[in-house]
Structures are given as C-alpha cells and as structure tokens.
Image (cartoon, coloured by chain):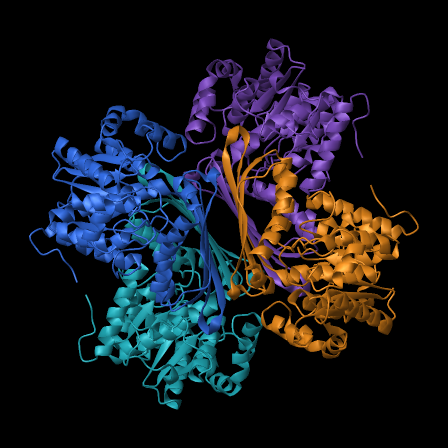
Chain colours: A blue, B cyan, C orange, D purple
C-alpha cells in the first residue's frame, strides 16, 4: 500500500525531521521511539508500512533538504550520523519537492498545486497521497463571503482577492484532488464551511488541529488528574519560550492568539470551569529548536487548603512532532483506504484543538485511538464509531 | 446506614483533618473539594452518607483532638474558623478515642482492641465499623513463623514475642471483629498470609496500601503519558522533603525503604522497564505539614533526541489524604454491605502500592473505580468484577 | 530624635505591614528579621530608633488600617496575634491618616498636603518627617512644559491641567515642606527637573526608585556571578505572577511598562550587554499578596557549551518591602539630620532602578551602604562620599 | 614565561577539556569565555600567557587524549570542530602523558613521579611546573603516624603501608620537586601537617580545595543575599544528580561524604547559623557530563512570613571547571614567580572549601582576587596581603 505524504512546509524543521526519521527507520539505522503507530495498541496490518511512505511537498523556501537536515544535526535535533548515512535517499526526496505556487490568482495557484499532487501520485504509482500541513502558523483570516460554500468559493478564487489563507488553499487543493488532509498547525486549514462541504463531496477524511507536543500534552494528563481527585484548580499560568521557526512567526500577535486559544481549550473542557491565568508564548531566538515551557498551577484541596504544582518542560518540538506526522499520515491513509470520510474525531489524541467534541483527556483519547485502530485492523467491519 | 470509622492513629494530622472535615461538611460549613466519592462518576445511593459516619479510634498519644485541630489550623492545614465552629462535635468524638493498648501479651492487646471496637459499635448502634490505619509508617517486621497461618499466629500471640508489628495487630483485631480494614500507609498491616486467610474466613473486604497523595499521583499520570507517546524514559529521580509526623518517622531507614519501594513500583509496571534514578525521602522539620517533591525526568524522543521534564509539587499531605480516608471508609463500608470480601483491587485509584495486579495508570484506575461504584449502586447485581 | 514617617498609600499592604511591624517591634512582640538597619554593618547611633518613628499618611481609600491589618493576617502576610495585640496603637495611627486631597487645582491639592504634613509635625513635635511613596504604580505621565523648572511648574499647577501625576504632586509637597522624600515605586515621583531643582533649593535629600524585593534582588546577585565567572548570558526570560494591589494596577499596560523597564536595567548595566529575553508581569488575582517569579537563564561556558539556570521565587511582597520602608525612613531621616541633600545614591542597595550611576551588584551596593552608614554614625565627619 | 601544567587525572573530562580549550584558544579557534584570568580586573602582565602553557600529566587510564576529546565532543561538552582542528597539537600533548606509577613502595612511586616531572621540565625548558589535581574524588584516608611530620612521612613511605592516598602522594612529589600544587578536588591532597610543612620548606605556594562550579557557586552569592537582607534562612535542601566520572566515584559513601561536607561549609560560615536540610549527591549515569542540581530554600521575612526560593542548575561540570584549571595554573604560577609560598588564601574565589579563613561570599572573594592579581601585576611591590 504505497502511500504518498505531501508536506506543506516541507523544508521546515518538523517536515525535515519526519523525512530523515522515516528514511532512517526504513534503513534500520534507528528505532521507532516516539512513533505511536508502532505501539502494541495501535499498530497493525491496516496501516501502510513506514517503508511504503513516499515523501514530497511544497515550500516557500528553497534550501535543500539535506542542508536543513545538517543544520538540525548541528543544533542537536537529529544525530549527524543519520544525515550522513542517507545522502541518496535525501536527494531522491529533494527531487519531489516543489516551490509553493505564488503566481496568478488563487485559482491558478490551486491548479498548480493539483498538478504537483497529480504528478507525484503518478510518478510513484501511489494508491493515495495524504497532505499534511506543517507550515508556520498563520493569523486568523479575514471573513470573506467565499468561505460559505464551494460555489461561492470557486468563483471568488478566480478574482484578485486573497480569499483563503495559504493553509486553506492547500486544503482546497488537497480535497479537490481526493487527498486526505491533516492540519498539524492551528492555522485555518479546512476549518471553513466551504471546505468541509467540499471534503464531504469528495469523500475524503481529514484530521486536526495543532499537534499536541508539549505543554498541552501535559495539560491533557494533569487537568484530568485534578478533576478525578476533585481538586479545585484556582489558577493555571504558563510561559512558553521557543526559538524555532514557529517562534519567530508567533511574535506576530495574530498567530500567537490562534496558538494560545488552542492551548487553553483543554482546561475549560476538562475541568468544567476556566481557572485564572493565561498561557503566553514568547520568541527567544537563542533557544533554537528547543522549547521551554513553565507552568504554575495553584489549587485547593480539602477544606480549601492551598497547594501548587510547577513544571518545566524542555522539549525539542521537531523531535516530538515528527513521529506524530508519520503516525497521522499512516492513520489517515488507512482511514481513506477503509472508505472513511469526514472529520476523524478519533484522532484527538494527537491534537491540541481536536475536531469534534472529543474529550481532552489523553487517557480517554488513547482509548478511542486504540479502538479506532482496532476497527481499521479488523478490516471488513464498519469502522465508524459511536 | 450508620457506619463507624475507626482510625488507628486517630490523633495524627490525617485523621484529625478527616474528622474535622467530615464534621464541617455535615454542618454545611465547607464543600466536598477533594472527596472523590462526591464526584458524578462515583457517588450514589450505595455509599453511606457523610452525615452517617461516626468516628472513633486508637492512638499512642493523648493530646486532645481539639488541640490537634487547633495546631493544624495554626499551621495553615485547616481553616481556624472550622475548628472554632465545632467544639461540641469534637468533644463528642473525643469521647470515642481510646489509648492504644500496650499492656500484656499481643493477644491481650488484641483482646483490648476488640473490646474497644465492640463497645464503639454498640454505643452507636452501627451497622458496621471500617478500620483505617493512618498511623506512622513502620519498618518491615522480622519474619516469624506465626505469620504463616491463623492457628500458628494465635498461638504465637500469647507468648512474649512481638510477633506482629502494630499495624498488623490492628488488622488482626479488625478482621477478627468482622470489620473491613483499609491500610492507608505502607506498613505491613494485613499483608501476611495468616491475616489474609483470616480476613477470608471472616468474610471481610480490605484495601491498601499507602494513600497516593503527591509525587506518586503525578507519576501515575505522567508515566502513562510517556508510554502512550512511545517516549523512552531514561531517568526519573525524585526528592521528597517533608516535615510532618511521617517525615520524622521516615528518618528511620527501614520505614523509609518501605515507602520508597511503594513509590517506585508505578514506574516499572507502567513503562515496562525501570528507568535510572531513585526516589529519596528526607525529613526537614521546618516544612511542617507541607511536602515539597521535586522530580527530574529525562527522556528520549524520535531519533534519540534528549529532553527533560521537571516538576515541583508543594502539597499538604493531610489535606490531600483526609478526603481519601473518608472515600475509602465509604467505599469499603458499601462493599461490605454488598457482601464483598477479600482484596478490593478496584480501589487501586487511591493507592501507591495497590493490592492485586491492577494497572498503575490513574486513568485506568479511575475507569475501574467508576465501574465498581456503578455496580455497588446498581445494588442487586453481582458486584464482583473481571 | 522623633521622626515622622508619612506614607503615601498608607492603607495599602506595604504601608500597613510596615506600621504593624514597627508597632510590634516597639512592643517587643517580634524580632527585626528583614530590617537591614538592624544588621551589624548598618545599625548605629545616627539612625532614629524604631521606637521613635511616628506614622501618618494619605490614601485615596478609607478602609480603617486595623481592618486592612486583619485582612493581611487572614491572607498569611501578618501573624494574626500581632494585629490582635495592638488595637490601641493602630487606633492612634488611624487618627493620623488623611484622605488624599482631590478638590481644586493641583496647587490647591498640594497646599492641602502641606497643611496635613505641617499638622502632623506639630502635633507630634517631630524633628522631621520623611515622606515615602508606597502607592500603586502609575503609568508614565504626558510631557508638560511645567516639568522643566520650579517657576513654570508653580504657574502650571494653578491651572486646570493635571500637570503632575499623583506621585510627583506628593514629591512637590514633600520637598516644599522641607521633607526628605523616598520613591519606593517606579512611578515618576521626583524624577522631573522642576522637582529635583526644588529639592536642591530646599536642601532635602531623596532616594529611589522602586524597592528591590524579589526577582530583581536575585538578578543583582546572579548577574554579577555570571560576570565574575566570565560566563556568557545568552538569554534571561522571566515571568512574574502577582495577585496583590499592585498586580491589578499592572494590568494597565503603561504601568507595567514602567515596572518592566526598571527590572531589566540591572542586566544590561551589570553584564555590559543585554541578553535576549524579556521580563513579563501578569496579574493572577488568586495569588493574593504572594508573588511567584520564574526566570530562565541560558548561558554559555568555556568553548561555548550551553547551560541553564532556572529559579522560582515565591515571596510575599509586603513582607519583603515593609522592613525596607522602615530602613529607608531611618536612613533618609539620618541623612537629613546630618545635613545631606540631593540624591542619596548610596542607598542603591534598596532599589531596582537606583538614582545615579551606582553599581547594580548587590554586594557592591552593600559595601557602599555600610560605608555610608559608617559615615553617618561617625557624626562630625563629612558624610558625602566619592 | 613558559609554564608547565601537570595534571593528575590528565585523561579525565576536566583535564581533557582544559587542554583542548587552551590549544583552541592558542590557535585562535575560540574565545576565552569562562576564563576569569581574561577579565579586566584580573588579567595582566604577571600571568603566563595562555600560549605559554605546556601540558603534561599522569593518569591510571590509558585512553588516548584525542579519543577522550572525541567522546566529549559526542556528548556535547566540546565542539567537534575544535577537536578535529587540533590533531597534531593533541598528539604533542599525548607524548607528555605518563602512566600513574603503581609499582613498588610509595617512596618508589613518588620517585617515579619526580622523574616524570623533572623530565617534563627539562624537555620543554620550563621555568616552573604547576601540578593540578583533577583526579576522581577519594574517600578520607585512615590516620597514620606518618601524616604528622616530613621525617616520619619519609620513613613511612618506604614501608609496605599505603600511608598516603594518591592525591597526597602527588602533592608530596610536587612540593618535593619545588612545584606549586593546586587541589581542584575535595581529596586530601596537601591537607596533612607533614605536607604543608614540606611545602613551606620548599617554598612553594599551594591552593585548594574543590573547584566551585555549580550549586556551591550559587550558594556563595545567594547566602550572602539572604544575610545582607536580614532574611532568616530556615532550610536549604539540595539534590545533585550527576552522571560523569566523578558521579560514579561518589556512589562510594566516603567520597560522597567528603564532597557534601565541602559543599555545606559555605552556609554556616556565611549565615552564622546552619539552616535545616542537607545536600545530597546521586549518580545517574544517563546524565553524562551534565549535572542537574535542585535546591529548595525556605526563609522567613518580616514578622516571620514564610517564603521560598527554588533553583535548578543544569551545568556541564567539565566546561565550568576547565577554564578555572587554566586560571589557577596561571595565578599559582605567577605567585610562585613572585616568590610567594604557603596557602594562597586569596584564591578562595575558585573553591568550595577554600584554604584559610577567607570569606565564602563570592563578591568578597572577587574583591580579594582582584587585589591579589593587582599586587602581582604591580610586580616589585610586596604581594603578601592582610
């Protein structure tokens, strides 16, 4: 089951790490640490093998992926020995990377995207291509009448306006091409009525939003802990310091707001009330690809006694995100193969701001993920749940 | 369903906080924060009402419980206004407290305990009495032939030896009196073949060991998080600084070892391997009833990239433990009422070192607890699980 | 040497704690912990005795000081027993508190302030009155021609404009009345050419700005440590979470900016370069009078090896600031008695943003403070330094 | 002024880092970050230039220093590019490394050490050789009559006993050879009456003990901060997790005790009282050459209000220690050149457990260091102080 993985933002840190990692795994040079789809409860025959994934993608920058990989190795994100061992494999991937279309109307650019996706599929005789957005976070777009339904959208795209933000133009191209689409960022992506309608029309499944890789991952186990123990969370304040590409983007207030919103959702929905305090994201270039998040949680126990929990998470975003990108490509590809379409709410485990009304508790999300994978692996049976 | 709660170590911080809290709840002076049995998934008609709990207990010290409560209020563990509002209620409890029997052979002392339990039950016309051990942690006892079976034990108790450590002598008295028994400490308690046999003979349920109130509570959500994300935990080191009564006890190397062992079990069993690092417990008198635990977890993600998580938990052990004592008394009492006997492995949610082979994941323990409570509330149906 | 201490913002947490503490010290109910002027290197005969301080002040709020003290006791800032032991002393202070003048032109208000200061001095036969500003932080004022010199200022004050921010109007009244003035906040206070000229004319000494009580105190020992070891500080990021009165004020962006600026000065001036990163201040009401500051410092050592230091400071601002207010009143009073006038740069030890070009290293500031106190105690000799 | 630096434990991480760093500095490949003797207040003409240092040493292991350097580069302690750029320089150093003498009586071994030192000095026409002990920490030795005076010692060394621990046998050889001696570890080294007498006889200066590179460095600025602010430190607890060579050594209880003792001295001597709490050192192999120290300090302010400070130090011991080794070699060499002998108490800045009664405040130590360096640079004048 040869499956294409088309990465939007393919020369970024996350995409590069995903690609180097998949190539290294295929070559037997490393193990599957961090890959959820290699765990007993999830792995199985319905998923495309890691060795069956073929990579391509778009990017606005042109730095060769091998150079990006070397830079990541120098920064401690990747082992240099892996990059050094895979020159031909990386060169082969390089040939599948395309510049992000920038000329003409948005309709013209979408058409160029469709051509790139079609060429990729044909060259490699792929059964399907999963499009995953790992580009930098965008600010929320301005409302536009074209967002309401597919016809209005198609008409608007031919005009001079920037009707869709880039993530949504890629989503439009993906679903139009019949490709499953995964939003690994908090950008708008498929979250417009015109696009979800279009996805339904084309029968493609989709998943999102915003890969859960650090502070929110911790929130999704700690908030349920407080809830299960009937402890009263009074305040939850956090500071995220990050130096990578997304950090620079987030100095833009609009993009930052989008990210912060998706980070806080877990608290209100898990606890049933919103504690005091905010989550802040700040760019500190010197931190490079590593991110430090500090959270202070104050809470009351029996008879109102005040207590507190503090944590510091020092993580490498690319190393945490990259295996999840592979997981999502495999799971979404398998869902498409099984004939599923629409929002894959069972993949909430992977996201800060999951589609649908799924729980925010990581444990409950895990239970749903395992059940979903189980249904996929059982094959013939109906894979829809609930 | 009037239920007695007989606390071993009744003048200690945990017991005093439990009692003041239950009296304050009954009087409508406070809310049920921290009480798991007041949460939607657990509460229900099978549990004795908080207002139906009657308190008594043994202790080796004689400080009036009202004085202990005042001292806890001064230390910030209890609100002073609650203690001030409950003078008569505390005086009524004081009348049910008995000195720990210390005269004669261990058989003589057990007989005195049985008389105290019987008198308590009769004076208050209680349907049952649940015995909960909240006394200071003991070192592991020396092996003795009397530990093997009830007959050998009964014979040995009449001799001059200290056959059983105090926690186990109380357990012996409890099960002989037909009382459910809960071990809230890591002491030996019921964990001797002679005693579990005896519990079965008398048809009493029991639960334990070692209330999960701080660092281990966090481990039971964080370790599953690492496992579910396929992250490789390389080391997990912790330091617990505590100043309360149990802290002083734990400067005794034997007691400390018992506590540390019960704290580390969760890691090996959840992760499937034991990371490097140790958990240490140190007594710092100045910290009083508050405990500070610091943990450093180093882990590897995709391609071996090293990352780390640190947390500091600053909790009040008494405020965390006290509502769980009430929860366990209610759940164990309800189990007894439902005719259950033997180890209540479905109560693993409450313990660092739970009986049986139950999971160490808090989320899974919560699922089991809710199912168990559900069966109790459904009444007629069979309450045994698995 | 009876010395008046006139507090602007006298019903706030810091002022109330200063007053209760001074009264308790005088009554022998507590010790001088936190009072720098009671340490061997600083104390001596030139300072007015704590028992010789007489308190008065202005405030815009009217809550009785005894009520404020009780509220602080309930919040754990003050021991309740002290407040309970000093009812008459607090009532005596209450009689010396005046509402902040609000009627008429700024000249009218300044005149009312002068009358209040004069009445206070006369009623208590005080040798001098030190005015200390401990009111909430203000935003930076708009420029005004009246700020340039005393004559322009006097003329402008009679008009309808709000020429001076409140802190500066108090400073104007203080120096006009011949009173030494201490700015314990980052507000403008005396920092206008018209006011410093006026202070010189009236021969009064003054000190400021912004009491150094937490994160900046740590910076003033840690930054020199990095400098003395030739370590290269790459980034220094901080988050201050605070819930007290000043916290609420600081949600105002202008006031926050003033505070943040005074906090960062120490880094640039000590290290000789400004590391990446910012200091943020956020209001979290639930934290009450306690403040939690978290700082992450990344630095490079020999051959560029990256390392990091993190700290969390959990302090009670009022308890840290109050003894310094007493210290400053005593030292500034003694300086005035010794005939000093102008900026007291030797008091840099106490301030985040000290007057003059004094060092930001706490150790160097301490050396200067001890030398200054030594000169005061030697009496006859010239007290001016450098 | 060509100066030899003879390192005991020359193939260890600290020594290797010192050597690679000095070679890289000489070659202009890196800057002097971390080198205190390159700071304005300390540098000057009296110190041997970094380019004039010549390296040699003893070790019990035989791994080529270039291999050790490569291993340190792989662990992130050294930049790989530096190691790659210095193959010939490292080979030249390799030729000056000798196996630690192990055959015969201790007198025989001392004689072999003397021959090695003499050969090194002659081959390179060195004006002097400074011996620096950077070998693994030893447990305290058993008392022996030979420790009392040089004659008894010389006699005892010829017998079969292990009279001296290795660090002291090197110290004996060093001073006998007229070489200044620096103890960078907490081992016994020169701290025996027989050896200090011998050092005086031979007119050599010496310095020690135990390089101050992490937690104790912080204590030496934080403890004075609390003292200067008259804050009452109630407890100071610390945990040091380290994985490097010294970590493994410190699992030996005796060596650990020596290290912990030297770490706590700063608190008692700076504060004037010993707070509650202990410092612990634990070996966690996975942490490699990096060390994580966590400290919790609880303290009381005005009126007894309880507060707390926590810090986490994540440092690379080799990167912190190596430049100090170079600093000490330069300063001790210059002291010898200036005719100084005996304990160099002005070098307390560098040590956890400094010789003499010098202050433990880093700022005061810095002042003394700068004054000492100033006297050295002034040349003709008398360099002895106090």
Q: Residue, x 77% and y 74% (percent of image)?
A: C96
Number of callouts in the render?
A: 0
Q: Residue at x 45, y 78 (%)?
A: B30
In the picture, which quadrant includes the C terminus of chain D? top right
Between D146 and C147, the residue placed more toward the observer is C147
Which quadrant: the N terminus of chain D? top right
> Picture coordinates of residue D328 (x, y %)?
64, 27
* Residue B134 horizontal/vertical position (percent): 43, 70
- Identify which residue is drawn at 38% across, 30% down: A71
Residue A360 rendering spot, x and y as whole percentages: 31, 59
Between D323 and B163, the one lying in front of the other is D323
State whether residue D100 appears in this view: no
Q: Quadrant of residue C73?
A: bottom right
Above or below — where is A303 with respect to D150? below
Vertical side of A267 occupied by C209: above or below: above
In-image side of C187 versus C114 (left or right): left
- Give the residue at the far left of this rendering: A380
In the depicted view, which residue is nearer to us: D123 or B311? B311
Q: Of residues D83 and D150, which is closer to you in this image? A: D83
Instruction: Name above or below for residue B259 compared with residue D259.
Output: below
Residue C345, position as x, y percentages in the image: 77, 48
A375 lies left or right of C180: left
**In the rendered view, would you say B65 is above or below A113?**
below
Q: Is residue C296 visible?
A: yes
Furthest toward the right, the residue is C380
Direction from residue D184 to residue C146 in the image, left or right: right
């Amino acid at each position: 089951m040869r499956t294409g993985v088309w990465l939007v933002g393919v020369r970024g840190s996350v995409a590069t790490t995903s690609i180097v990692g998949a190539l290294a795994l295929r070559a037997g040079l490393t193990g599957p640490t961090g890959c959820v789809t290699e765990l007993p409860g999830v792995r199985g025959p319905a998923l495309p093998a890691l060795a069956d994934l073929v990579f391509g993608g778009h990017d606005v920058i042109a730095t060769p992926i091998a150079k990006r990989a070397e830079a990541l190795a120098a920064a401690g994100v990747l082992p240099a020995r892996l990059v050094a061992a895979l020159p031909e494999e990386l060169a082969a991937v390089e040939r599948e990377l395309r510049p992000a279309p920038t000329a003409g109307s948005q309709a013209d650019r979408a058409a160029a995207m469709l051509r790139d996706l079609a060429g990729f599929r044909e060259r490699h005789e792929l059964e399907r291509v999963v499009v995953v957005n790992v580009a930098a976070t965008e600010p929320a777009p301005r409302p536009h009448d074209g967002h309401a339904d597919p016809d209005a959208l198609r008409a608007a795209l031919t005009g001079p306006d920037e009707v869709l933000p880039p993530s949504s133009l890629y989503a439009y191209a993906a679903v139009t091409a019949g490709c499953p689409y995964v939003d690994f960022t908090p950008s708008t992506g498929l979250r417009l009525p015109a696009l979800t309608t279009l996805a339904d029309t084309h029968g493609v499944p989709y998943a999102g939003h915003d890969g859960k890789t650090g502070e929110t991952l911790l929130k999704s186990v700690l908030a349920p802990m407080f809830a299960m123990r009937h402890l009263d969370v009074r305040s939850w304040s956090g500071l995220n310091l990050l130096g990578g590409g997304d950090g620079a983007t987030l100095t833009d207030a609009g993009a930052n707001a989008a990210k912060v919103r998706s980070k806080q959702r877990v608290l209100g929905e898990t606890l049933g009330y919103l504690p005091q305090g905010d989550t802040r994201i700040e760019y500190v270039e010197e931190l490079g690809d590593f991110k430090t998040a500090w959270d202070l949680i104050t809470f009351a126990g029996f008879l109102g006694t005040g207590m507190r929990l503090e944590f510091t998470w020092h993580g490498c975003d690319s190393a945490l995100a990259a295996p999840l990108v592979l997981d999502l490509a495999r799971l979404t590809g398998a869902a498409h193969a099984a004939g599923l379409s629409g929002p894959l709410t069972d993949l909430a485990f992977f996201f800060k701001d999951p589609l649908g009304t799924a729980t925010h508790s990581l444990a409950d999300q895990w239970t749903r993920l395992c059940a979903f994978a189980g249904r996929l692996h059982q094959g013939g049976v109906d894979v829809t749940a609930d």
